[in-house]
């Protein structure tokens, strides 16, 4: 059984992905496959742990979706993590040309959050809610 | 099969009020839209309205350009301070960011700050670490507004499609 918390997180993510980058989760999956993101994260879970450790720094244990998304996208823009460890760099450059920088980084940030929810390998009690608790 | 402990279940239940709040907000919004549907609106030909909108867009662009120039000046100052090794005030790194381009522009200062932290002894890192956190947090308000506006547009379009 999918826990309530995770189901709700996926539902919120579905709405936000659709609204912000105009993609449903299936399309997002296809794009991420081209970027090789899931495979790279699968091979290097440490990088995912690093992203979420920085993202949760000084935040409440239950951050809003907005603040978490902002942190993750900013970490990617600031290259706090080596992007080549998360994506196929050429494919990412192509995506940037196709949809613009903002959209490309947003797609990647959504992808990372989705991968995290899907795997739930890290023991953070995150729930991606719209409103701050 | 019961596999969860009591505290685990309590944790899950604790999120339910937030879920209901969201559901209630969406429902009341839907009801408000239903009411609006019955109001007749006469729309004048677009040319009568395009001028004020064009003016508004121009003003908005001017504000953004001006803000970007101010931010760039501030970023250059911060960069100079870091390069010269001067003492920094972490509060200066709380930047007001209003566009995505500004978010990208601050990346160089962030990189410099990170290099500085790595080259420093641990006991001297505290203000720089604080500055790094402030910089990471800058622009949250912009992101929040961006997500909110996109979500509202999406909901409006979906409602219009459903007719």
Image (cartoon, helix red, strand yellow):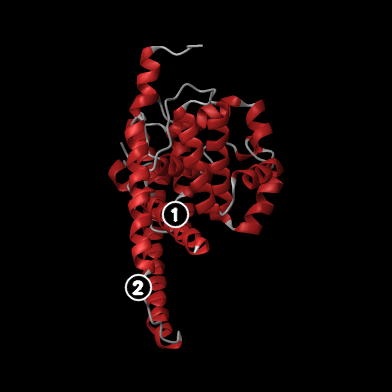
- Across and down, in percent, residue A49 comes to 52, 27
**Tag on residue B151?**
1
Tell which of B112 and B33 is nearer to you.
B33
Q: Which chain contains the residue that carries disc 2?
A: B
- The span from disc 1 to disc 2 (Cα, nearest Å) is 24 Å
- Across and down, in percent, residue B163 comes to 49, 64
| Residue at the (51%, 53%) spot, across then down | A20
Q: In this view of the protein, can residue B63 be seen by the observer?
A: yes
**Tag on residue B143?**
none
- Give the residue pinned by disc 2: B39
- Across and down, in percent, residue A16 comes to 49, 47
For this view, does A85 lie left or right of residue A71?
A: right
Tell which of A27 and B14 is nearer to you.
B14
For this view, does B62 lie left or right of residue A103?
A: left
At mark 1, the secondary structure is helix
Q: Quadrant of the N terminus of chain A?
A: top right
At mark 2, the secondary structure is loop
- Across and down, in percent, residue B138 comes to 37, 47
| Residue at the (49%, 47%) spot, across then down | A15
Q: Residues within 10 Å of mark 2 (few under 14, many from 20)?
A: few
Tell which of A33 and A95 is nearer to you.
A33
| Residue at the (44%, 25%) spot, across then down | A124
Q: In this view of the protein, can residue B127 be seen by the observer?
A: no
Q: Is residue A120 above or below residue B69?
A: above
Q: Is residue A42 above or below residue B107?
A: above
| Residue at the (35%, 24%) spot, across then down | B123
Residue A86 figure quarter: top right
């Amino acid at each position: 059984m999918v826990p309530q918390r995770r189901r709700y997180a996926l539902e919120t993510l579905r709405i936000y992905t659709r609204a912000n980058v105009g993609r449903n989760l299936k399309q997002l999956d296809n794009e991420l496959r081209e970027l090789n993101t899931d495979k790279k994260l699968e091979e290097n879970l440490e990088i995912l742990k690093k992203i979420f450790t920085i993202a949760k720094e000084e935040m409440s244990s239950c951050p809003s979706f907005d603040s978490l998304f902002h942190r993750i996208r900013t970490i990617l823009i600031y290259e706090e993590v080596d992007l080549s460890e998360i994506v196929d760099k050429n494919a990412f450059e192509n995506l940037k040309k196709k949809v613009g920088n903002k959209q490309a980084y947003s797609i990647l940030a959504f992808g990372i959050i989705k991968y995290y929810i899907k795997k739930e390998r890290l023991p953070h009690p995150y729930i991606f809610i719209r409103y701050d608790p | 099969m019961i596999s969860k402990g009591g505290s685990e279940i309590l944790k899950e239940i604790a999120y339910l009020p937030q879920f209901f709040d969201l559901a209630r907000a969406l429902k009341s919004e839907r009801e408000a839209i239903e009411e609006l549907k019955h109001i007749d609106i006469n729309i004048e030909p677009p040319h009568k309205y395009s001028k004020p909108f064009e003016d508004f867009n121009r003003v908005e662009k001017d504000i953004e350009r001006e803000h970007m120039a101010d931010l760039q000046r501030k970023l250059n100052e911060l960069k100079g301070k870091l390069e010269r090794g001067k003492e920094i005030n972490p509060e200066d790194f709380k930047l007001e960011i209003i566009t995505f381009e500004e978010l990208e522009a601050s990346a160089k200062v962030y990189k410099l700050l990170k290099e500085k932290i790595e080259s420093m002894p641990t006991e001297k890192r505290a203000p720089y670490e604080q500055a790094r956190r402030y910089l990471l947090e800058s622009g949250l308000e912009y992101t929040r507004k961006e997500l909110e506006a996109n979500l509202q547009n999406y909901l409006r379009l979906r409602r219009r499609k459903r007719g």
